[in-house]
């Protein structure tokens, strides 16, 4: 069965400092990886996905299959980045693409 | 269309009562998912619909839980004989058919069982 691990429940970073949120996964095949974000009093929303190779709001994530990791990074933190971040994976089978989530990391940006 | 909506947003009930939640997905989305989130955890998959067909149920979904999507549009999740352990946020998400389309989440229904 697949599993997603986010080792940090809480992370505090000063504004302007680099941010790295860790995510490790376990799955014997080739999953697809995502980062979801939940800002205060808002619903869960997609931040970025591995397949798109995109940078959203300055965030990037690189899939490292050797280390089974998908860490989220941003070079310069901004106050509006404070939120709850969830790493998730799915196995695309053109049908049920249910997501398996990690336990989340609460990121706080210190002004 | 303002996105996925869920009703009610909050529900407080006594142990042993039945509750029903509703989810209205984005109108053109064929896929619908229910997840449950407890304190300190990420969302956990409960069940999946493709149009009106319920194609997968998690082992988390005991016999007291039932979900329907009768016309392939809105969905309901019913919990019978609620227990305190059912207290959680129940999330609904929808997506279009196709590969790795984004799942759009609703605001959730927070259930408290006293």
Image (tube, coloured by chain):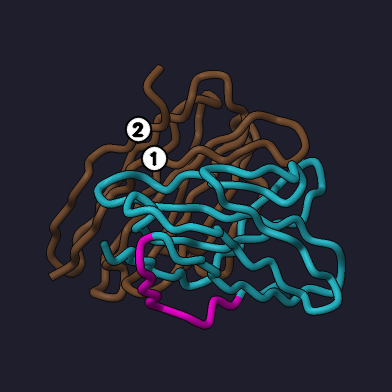
Question: Percent position (x, y) of residue B110?
Answer: 25, 55
Question: What residue is at 57 percent from the left and 63 percent from the top?
Answer: A87
Name the foreground residue: B9 vs A43. A43
In the figure, the shade used to draw chain B is brown
Secondary structure under the numbered disc 1 in the rendered image: loop
- State yes or no: residue A13 in magenta: yes
Which residue is under mark 1?
Answer: B106
Question: Percent position (x, y) of residue B8?
Answer: 22, 41
- In the rendered structure, the answer to whether residue A31 lies left or right of residue B75 reads right
Question: What residue is at 79 percent from the left and 79 percent from the top?
Answer: A67
- In the rendered structure, the answer to whether residue B106 lies left or right of residue B51 reads left
Q: Which mark is residue A86?
A: none
Disc 1 + disc 2, Cβ < 8 Å: yes
**Label whose residue precedes the other's in the sequence (1 or 2):** 2
Q: In which quarter of the image is residue B36?
A: bottom left
What segment is highlighted magenta in the picture?
A5-15
Distance from the alpha carbon under mark 1 to that under mark 2 = 5 Å
**Residue B36 vertical position relative to residue A40 in the rendered view, above or below:** below
Which residue is under mark 2?
Answer: B5
Disc 1 chain ID: B
In the figure, the shade used to draw chain A is cyan
Question: What residue is at 41 percent from the left and 32 percent from the top?
Answer: B4
**Residue A73 vertical position relative to residue B96 in the rendered view, above or below:** below
């Amino acid at each position: 069965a697949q599993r997603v691990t986010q080792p940090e429940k809480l992370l505090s970073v000063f504004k302007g400092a680099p941010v790295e949120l860790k995510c490790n996964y376990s799955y014997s095949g080739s999953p697809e990886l995502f980062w979801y974000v939940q800002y205060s009093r808002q619903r869960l929303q997609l931040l970025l996905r591995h397949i798109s190779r995109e940078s959203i709001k300055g965030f990037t994530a690189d899939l490292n299959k050797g280390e089974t990791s998908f860490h989220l990074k941003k070079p310069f933190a901004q106050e509006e980045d404070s939120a709850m971040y969830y790493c998730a994976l799915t196995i695309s089978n053109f049908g049920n693409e249910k997501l398996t989530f990690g336990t989340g990391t609460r990121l706080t940006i210190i002004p | 269309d303002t996105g996925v909506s869920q009703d009610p947003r909050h529900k407080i009930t006594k142990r042993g009562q039945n509750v029903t939640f509703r989810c209205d997905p984005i109108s053109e989305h064929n896929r619908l998912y229910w997840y449950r989130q407890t304190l300190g955890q990420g969302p956990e998959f409960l069940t999946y619909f493709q149009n009106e067909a319920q194609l997968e149920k998690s082992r988390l979904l005991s016999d007291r839980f039932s979900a329907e999507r009768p016309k392939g549009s809105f969905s309901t999740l019913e919990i019978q004989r609620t227990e305190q352990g059912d207290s959680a946020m129940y999330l609904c998400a929808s997506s279009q058919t196709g590969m790795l389309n984004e799942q759009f989440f609703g605001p959730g229904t927070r259930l408290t069982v006293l």
